[in-house]
Image: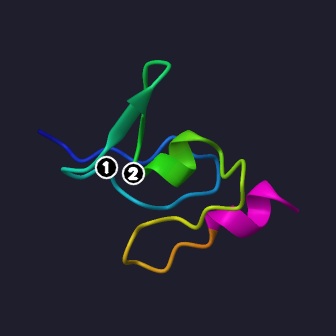
Amino acid sequence: MQEKKCACQDCNCQLGETAVMKDGKGYCCQGCAEHHAHGEPCASATGCECTKSAHG
């Protein structure tokens, strides 16, 4: 099975074993699944900074 990219708009992470499914889309972590509503960082160990673009 091919790895899929996180559905968070500016996230560059791949879905792994801890993927979160929401509204039929896959996210790499809960923060991304909630669109960083409370400023939660991306839980990926790759240093993804998608949180910054979520809040401008």
Location of residue 31 with respect to 26 vertically, above or below: below
Identify the residue under disc 1: 15
In the image, is residue 47 above or below residue 28? below
Magenta span includes 25: no
Q: Where's residue 42, x and y in %?
A: 52, 65
Comparing 31 with 5, the one in front is 31
- Badge number at residue 28: 2
Quadrant showing the N terminus? top left
Q: Residue at x 77, y 62 (%)?
A: 53
The picture places residue 18, in percent across and down from the top left corner, at: 25, 50
In the displayed structure, does residue 8 sit left or right of residue 22? right
Please identify the quarter of the rendering in which residue 4 is found. Answer: top left
Percent across and percent down for residue 23 are 50, 19
- Residue at the top extreme? 24
Cα–Cα span, label 1 and label 2: 5 Å
Secondary structure mostly seen in magenta is helix
Rendered-image quadrant of the C terminus: bottom right
Residue type, numbered disc 1: Leu
Mark 1 in CB contact with mark 2 (< 8 angstroms)? yes
Give the residues in magenta. 50-56
- Residue 7 lies left or right of residue 16; in this view the side is right
Mark found first going from the N terminus, 1 or 2: 1
The colour scheme applied to this rendered structure is rainbow
Instruction: Residue type at mark 2: give it.
Output: Cys
- 17 displayed left or right of 27: left
Query: Around disc 2, counting alpha carbons within 10 Å, would you say few (fewer than 14), some (14 to 19), or many (20 or more)?
Result: many
